[in-house]
Amino acid sequence: MLLALLAALTMWADVAVQPAGPKNDGSDRHDPDYKLNNFNTLKTDLNGNPRYVLAATEMVHYPDDDSTHLMRPHFTQYAENKPYTQIEGQRGLVTSDGEQVYVMDKVKVVRAATAQKGEMTVLTDFLHIIPDDEIARTDRPVTILQAPKTVVHAIGMEYDKKNGLLKLSKRVRAHYEKPAAKSVPRSAAPKKAQAPRKAAAPKTASTKKANNGNSKTRTRRPQ
């Protein structure tokens, strides 16, 4: 019995230290298990207010790493008392927990205009988004267009929407044009009133020349 127990423990130890063999259920293959076309998903806060909306023309899910790949993703982020932000690109990737979003190729970020600031547009080819922290960052070249006429070029950026901060990493070049002062139209000056013309006095006499060159004066009473 003792020898049998020792033999069983030896076999168990040998199996325990061996690497796990490949599974035959296909879960370790990077093959999609489902696809969706023209989908739209909404996430809200505890009060039911929208936090963000994610849409795409195609979504493909892979079970081996629980990742989701997107075609033509369009991401809209909302915040209370703040302008919304839209992010779009040609390709996207969402991690298994949904806390990391990556957008690639012709990425465009638009922050809506406010009463104090004009619309801001960011152009790049890669963007890493952390939706819950309202942060978007990249280490690639970026171009920032700030209405009305500000253009900024840089390499590397982090946009913290929650705190309203935009950080640029290196090789920053900016072109800024001071907005022209708004001209206040002058109110048209009122036309001067013209004095009424005096009425012509009625004629009281007429002169008639005689054939001999002498003139006779007749007096008429005004009618």
Image (cartoon, rainbow, N blue to C red):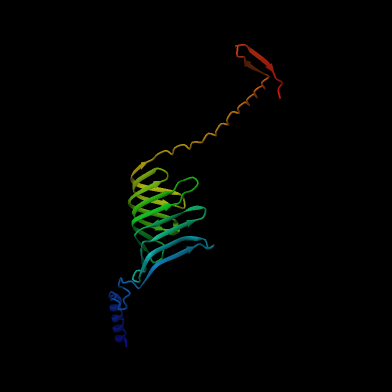
Residue at 28 percent of width and 84 percent of height: 7
Residue at 36 percent of width and 45 percent of height: 152
220 or 27: nearer the viewer:
220
In the rendered image, residue 29, in percent from the top left (x then y), is placed at 30, 72
In the rendered image, residue 9, in percent from the top left (x then y), is placed at 31, 81
**How many marks can you see?**
0
Residue sticking out furthest to the bottom: 1
In the rendered image, residue 74, in percent from the top left (x then y), is placed at 40, 60
65 or 58: nearer the viewer:
58
Q: Is residue 101 left or right of residue 7?
A: right
| Residue 125 against residue 191 in the figure, above or below | below
The image quadrant where one finds the N terminus is bottom left
Residue at 51 percent of width and 55 percent of height: 80
In the rendered image, residue 10, in percent from the top left (x then y), is placed at 29, 80
Residue sticking out furthest to the front: 211
| Residue 101 against residue 144 in the figure, above or below | below
Question: Quadrant location of residue 208?
Answer: top right
The image quadrant where one finds the C terminus is top right
Question: Quadrant location of residue 21?
Answer: bottom left
Residue at 45 percent of width and 61 percent of height: 53
